Image (tube, coloured by chain):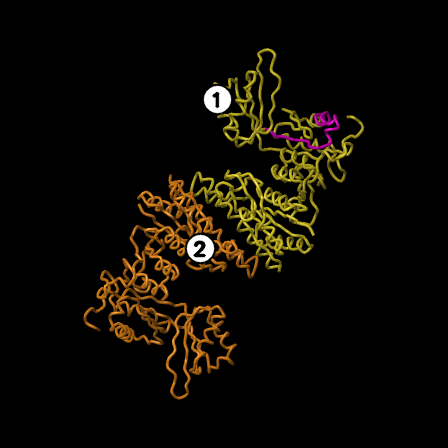
Chain colours: A yellow, B orange
């Protein structure tokens, strides 16, 4: 008998009917002989509705109170699921993040988990209960206030509990069948992956794949928690996120998938002097504005005037603020101009296989060229190639790469092993 | 500078607009220089809506989970009021019953307060904050589970906090202007009382007056907390509940008001043997069914057969169960028949003055007779006379008594001092 942690998102528990279906699945897992811990998000649009109420009474709600408000949503859904489980004859108890021992820092709205001490959960399990834990929340170690964990918080709660309880697996239930080689809405013959390594999933998530949040995958990787992403609407096996690419034999390494991101904009600071400290000033300015940066590209300076351009990408919503912050420090940073472009898309190829197959970059660029897609900037990591393209060409680029690396259908994509291309 | 505890009910915070109005009143109180603690009920019909959701997923929800679910309502409203206060430029922090130190027993759904240790509230006040506390809830001393306090729980929370914090007053905000000499919907010239003693308010509440719950008044009396009942829709002073009738000079004692109760039924167990133990068996049977009893009347036994009748009243909803419980023990209790009547009304006259004025009972009965109202049974306490009448005659009885004791309009009711009537 093992221990299974399951996480259900808001749409999975959006109505009383859905809640009862989820309860049946949970009880079935228990009947298979496992200890079961379940993390549930707030029902449907509850979080958005609560945010809306908050905006009605205050244009700028204090972060502490926003957390007190929003955490009610998870409390409601977890209690209801526990009730539905009881109605099926099994024993269940619901707990808040605080009661479950999820300890965080005091950054309201996007708290970091410091520790998980699930003593009460363990006791409840030992007494034969199914334990429900409100996701997306914890308690601040310093202030003892309730905190929320930010986007993807419920997934992170589930993985963190799975790690602390030494669970055999953490099952993330969602409304898609698993992790795909590309977004099936863009690529109709995208294939569902049976497995994917932690590093590749990290790159997919960082590159725009929305099925799992980056922090949740990183937590799983650090503690070695196997994560299964599957649908709450059927019994398919989904995708198992497990293992390190270091454990994959070199010749077997594959190209795993194509991710895309539409929500970014590009900022180019043109004509900066190419000497130490300039980049530091630029990125400190952005950091002070609490803006996260994704890609950064700087090319060699022009021999003529010793100046260069620095380009970075960021979420579109933060674009205007970033430009304003840089403009306000024009005197110190000394640049010629700022070019802002929010009609970009990012497409990324991910796969452990590209470490050992040098021809991948060439195939990548050829595929895009053949599709008539112009590459704006390129940025790579050990297992990922990302490019920025015009946003209207994003879908074309995704499909072109997916085809070029034969990721679709029943066949697993295989890099041309042994050909050195 | 004093400390004021305010309590706002569900309709007072039913919408975002109402919440902002309440926040203005709270901030105004703070600006007058007081420390302010506010207890807020759940918004509008939230509690009923949550109960409905619970019923949809489980016909018989476990009590612990029901408390986890229902307490979300108060959490939401208190966080929203705190936000609204912040938007007005004042500092506010919301707390759950648990965080506020409301310690209870573990009877989910109707927990009793064991202790109140409001250390975090005191600290928040000392830091200049207005403290919001979720009403209707606490934490179990034994299990550390969240509990709800049952009907009137938010009023009780407010009075309990006022006692523990040594507040100068506990203001209960509601949708009526205060405590009246009778229900203004029955008696158009009912007068609002400026003050009322604890004992008289207890009798009014026990006799059907709905403005304050019995347990809240009893808690206030025991700890000497002045309670002001006033409207959240205007700035009128309301009614101050304070003081003991022992402190009222005998000659000044008054008749205070007329209360009525429509929700009771009457059970008469006819032809029981008049010897020790019979009443005990009857009332143990009722208590085992967890039914609360109000009036009890037993008259002398008939000389002929040594039998008597025992009559009691109880909430209408419990009537059928009580009758069934008694019937099921017919062999042991040995009675001739059970008569059940749910077409009764109870009307009560309350006033410290009746202790020292023996003519009150006569005036009472004469007033009802003159109005053509037949008295079914009479039951009295030191400061209350209650009778059961036919439900269709209840309003007539209330008005007749209110007029006979001149309780209406601008004049305070005066018992015929010195005439001995």
Residue numbers of the magenta segment: A344-366
**Point 59% across, 11% down: residue:** A304
Percent across and percent down for residue A168 are: 68, 46
Residue A92 lies, with reference to residue A248, above or below; the image says: below
- Disc assigned to residue A223: none
Chain letter behind tag 2? B
Q: Where on the picture, by quarter, is residue B339?
A: bottom left
Is residue A26 in the magenta section? Answer: no
User: Pointer 1: what residue?
Assistant: A329
Q: Give the CA separation, mark 1 to mark 2.
A: 54 Å
Percent across and percent down for residue A263 are: 58, 33
**Quick one: A397 or A18, which is closer to the camera?**
A18
Residue B217 lies, with reference to residue B85, above or below; the image says: below
**Point 67% across, 56% down: residue:** A31
User: Pointer 2: what residue?
Assistant: B136
Q: Quadrant of the C terminus of chain A?
A: top right
Whether residue B192 appears in this view of the structure is no
**Point 39% across, 74% down: residue:** B296
Local crowd size for mark 2, using a 10 Å CA cut-off: few (<14), some (14–19), many (≥20) = many
């Amino acid at each position: 008998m093992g221990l299974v942690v399951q996480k259900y998102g808001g749409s999975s528990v959006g109505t009383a009917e859905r809640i009862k279906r989820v309860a049946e699945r949970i009880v079935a897992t228990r009947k298979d002989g496992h200890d079961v811990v379940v993390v549930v998000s707030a029902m449907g649009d509850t979080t958005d509705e609560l945010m809306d109420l908050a905006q009605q009474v205050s244009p700028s709600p204090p972060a502490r109170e926003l957390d007190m408000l929003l955490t009610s949503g998870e409390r409601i859904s977890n209690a209801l699921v526990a009730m539905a489980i009881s109605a099926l004859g099994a024993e269940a108890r619901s707990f808040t993040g605080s009661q479950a021992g999820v300890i965080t820092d005091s950054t309201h709205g996007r708290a970091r988990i410091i520790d998980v001490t699930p003593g009460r959960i363990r006791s409840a399990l030992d007494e034969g209960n199914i334990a429900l834990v409100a996701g997306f929340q914890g308690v601040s170690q310093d202030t003892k206030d309730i905190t929320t964990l930010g986007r993807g918080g419920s997934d992170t709660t589930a993985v963190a509990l799975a790690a602390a309880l030494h669970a055999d697996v953490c099952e993330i239930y969602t409304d898609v069948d698993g992790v795909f080689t590309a977004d099936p809405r863009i690529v109709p013959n995208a294939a569902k992956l049976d497995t994917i390594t932690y590093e590749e999933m990290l790159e997919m998530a960082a590159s725009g794949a929305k099925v799992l949040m980056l922090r949740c995958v990183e937590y799983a990787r650090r503690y070695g928690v196997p994560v299964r992403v599957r649908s709450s609407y059927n019994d398919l096996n989904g995708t198992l996120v497990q293992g390190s690419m270091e454990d994959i034999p070199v010749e077997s390494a594959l190209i795993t998938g194509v991710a895309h991101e539409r929500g970014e904009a590009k900022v180019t600071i043109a004509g900066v002097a190419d000497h130490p400290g300039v980049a530091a000033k630029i990125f400190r300015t952005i950091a002070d504005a609490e803006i996260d940066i994704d890609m950064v590209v700087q090319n060699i300076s022009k021999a003529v005037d010793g100046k260069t351009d620095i380009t970075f990408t960021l979420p579109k919503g933060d674009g205007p603020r970033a430009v304003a912050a840089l403009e306000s420090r024009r005197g110190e940073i000394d640049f010629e101009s700022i070019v802002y472009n929010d009609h970009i898309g990012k497409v990324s190829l991910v796969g452990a296989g590209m470490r050992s197959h040098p021809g991948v970059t060439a195939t990548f660029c050829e595929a895009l060229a053949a599709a008539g897609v112009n590459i704006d900037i390129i940025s790579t990591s050990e297992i990922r190639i990302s490019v920025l393209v015009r946003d209207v060409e994003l879908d074309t680029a995704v499909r072109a790469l997916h085809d070029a690396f034969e990721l679709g259908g029943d066949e697993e994509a295989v890099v041309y092993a042994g050909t050195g291309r």
